[in-house]
Amino acid sequence: MPKLSIIVPVFNTESYLGECLDSLLNQTLLDIEIIVVNDCSPGNCSEIVNEKKQTDNRLRLIENKINLGTFHTRKAGVLCAEGEFITFVDSDDSLKSEACSMIYNALMSSGADIAHIACSRFEGVNFKHIPFSDEADEHAFRPQAGLVTADKWREQLIEYDIDNCVWSYAVRKELYFKAYSKLEFCPRLLMLEDFLLMFTVSGENVNNCIYLEERLYNYRIDASGITQSIGNTDKLIAMISDISYSLITSEKILSKSQYYTQEMLLRFKNRMIHDFEWYAKQFFKLPDEQKALAIERLDKKNTATIWLNLIARLGEKYSNNKYLIFDYLPTKEKLKVIIKFFLGR
């Protein structure tokens, strides 16, 4: 059994994939496996992997038959992993050569189920950390050190006192298996899939977390990333659908967890609204006809009810909004009234 399985989801990162894989193949910890999952990426990504496989049998390649999105691509790698612990590396990022050794040694010496590492945000070839422009992000991603209880980790997750990016963590394999079993029917997800997975893991029986303060993960800044720009209504609709599903599903899962008290759930709900409100504001900036179109498309994705529920939770600042006066109606009737209001039909 490998000590650590590294899952690398790949889509449209041909320019950086070789650099990423070299950083993994050159780890000082030799007893690892590297599972690359190609999500129907254009270009020569598979060829790059196959060439490196010829000289290192620790490298495995999985080819998705159809494009599944980030959530299910990572899941495909986890379900065939053989390692004792699992970590993720995005295919345009990399690890420092000693990362796996330090992570595994920390897990073994502490007896923890989860390890957290810090990242360096970089551009080009200089791995010097570029600070986040947002103070909350800079705080959550700051280096932390020491052994903490699972309850302390959960508290930090809720308060955004630590990040929820899956590539920041190495997790005992069984915890991911349990989490994915509860997320069996997830739709294709590209947004907030990290949030959903890590909070689902937090609802399990976790035995402590060890924090390593070294910046072992190299995170490449991508100015064109999906969270950087809305761009158009179609993208906003897709983002809203993913975010709504991830938030509400996380809430449902944690409400059934014996490791979350009612007080913790209340604070988690406040965190949900904080994360959600920015996207709500983008939605309300749309022209009325595009709002109506967005609601229709969300209904086809089966997330319109979730979206309206989250809007209603925003409280008094949206209390006069036309979306909140139809709570007594069934969803389909509510949609008809909204669309009629906007389009005059």
Image: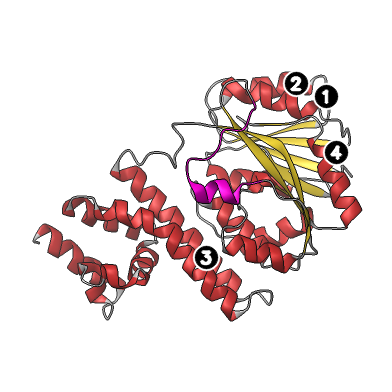
Q: Which kind of residue does numbered mark 4 sit on?
A: Ser
Q: Residue at x 63, y 57 (%)?
A: 198
Is residue 118 in view from this perspective? Answer: yes
Principal secondary structure, stretch drawn in magenta = loop
- The disc, 4 or 2, on the residue closer to the chain's N-terminal end is 2
Label 2 crowd bin: few (<14), some (14–19), many (20+), radius 10 Å = some
Q: Which residue is mark 3?
A: 249
Q: Which kind of residue does numbered mark 1 sit on?
A: Asp
Q: Are marks 2 and 1 in contact (CB under 8 Å)?
A: yes
**Residue 259 image point, x, y percent:** 69, 74
Question: Which region shows up in magenta?
Answer: 127-142
What distance separates the C-alpha of mark 3 from that of mark 4? Answer: 35 Å
Q: Which kind of residue does numbered mark 3 sit on?
A: Thr
- The disc, 4 or 1, on the residue closer to the chain's N-terminal end is 1
Q: Residue at x 48, y 49 (%)?
A: 191
For marks 3 and 4, give the one nearer the viewer: 4
**Residue 37 image point, x, y percent:** 65, 36
- The disc, 3 or 1, on the residue closer to the chain's N-terminal end is 1
Q: Are marks 3 and 4 in contact (CB under 8 Å)?
A: no
Q: Nearer the viewer, residue 134 or 252?
A: 134
> Is 254 situated above or below 198?
below
What distance separates the C-alpha of mark 3 from that of mark 1? Answer: 40 Å
Q: Nearer the viewer, residue 207 or 36?
A: 207
Q: Quadrant of residue 59?
A: top right
What label does residue 101 carry, if any? 4
Q: Which residue is mark 2?
A: 52
> Under tag 2, what secondary structure?
helix
